[in-house]
Image (cartoon, helix red, strand yellow):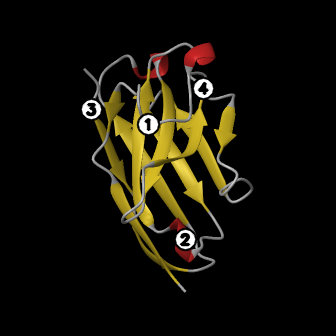
Amino acid sequence: QVQLVESGGGSVQAGGSLRLSCAASGRTFSSYAMDWFRQAPDKEREFVAAVSRSGRIPSYADSVKGRFTISRDNAKNTVYLQMNSLKPEDTAVYYCAADSRPASLRTRRPDGMDYWGKGTLVTVSS
């Protein structure tokens, strides 16, 4: 069992920055690829970014590429999402998720993730 707890959300003006953290319990954190998803009001949950088990291979949704950076610290059982140049359309609840599937079977869809955090709200005002 892995528990995920997000933090770092808040309110910021457009152009600002926030750093989200997701702390994981348990000793098997490094065996999971980690993803960030977000869900805006009345919208489906969408992929934001992912990082491989080693932390060496990140991937991003086109909408955040060049503005967001995902990273992880396996010694601290934590994954991060640095968000710069924030836009009002980035407003959403942000969730981290853990995925035990091999890389060849991973997708950018929310289904199939093993564990989810409860989310942290990010609000970007214009």
Residue 53, quarter of picture:
top right
Earlier-in-chain disc, 4 versus 1: 4
Earlier-in-chain disc, 3 versus 1: 3
Q: Residue at x 62, y 29 (%)?
A: 55
Earlier-in-chain disc, 1 versus 2: 2
Q: Amino acid at mark 1?
A: Pro
Apparent side of residue 117 relative to residue 51 in the rendered image (left or right): left
Tell me if label 1 and label 2 are in contact, CB under 8 Å.
no
Apparent side of residue 35 relative to residue 104 in the rendered image (left or right): left
Is disc 1 placed on a helix, strand or loop?
loop
Could you classify mark 4 by the number of other residues whose Cα lies within 10 Å: few (under 14), some (14-19), or many (20 or more)? many
The residue tagged 1 is 110
Q: Residue furthest right?
A: 66
Q: Amino acid at mark 4?
A: Ser
The residue tagged 4 is 52
Q: Amino acid at mark 3?
A: Gln
In the image, which disc is placed on residue 3? 3
Q: CA distance from mark 3 to mark 4?
A: 18 Å
The residue tagged 2 is 89
Tell me if label 3 and label 1 are in contact, CB under 8 Å.
no
In front: label 3 or label 2: 2
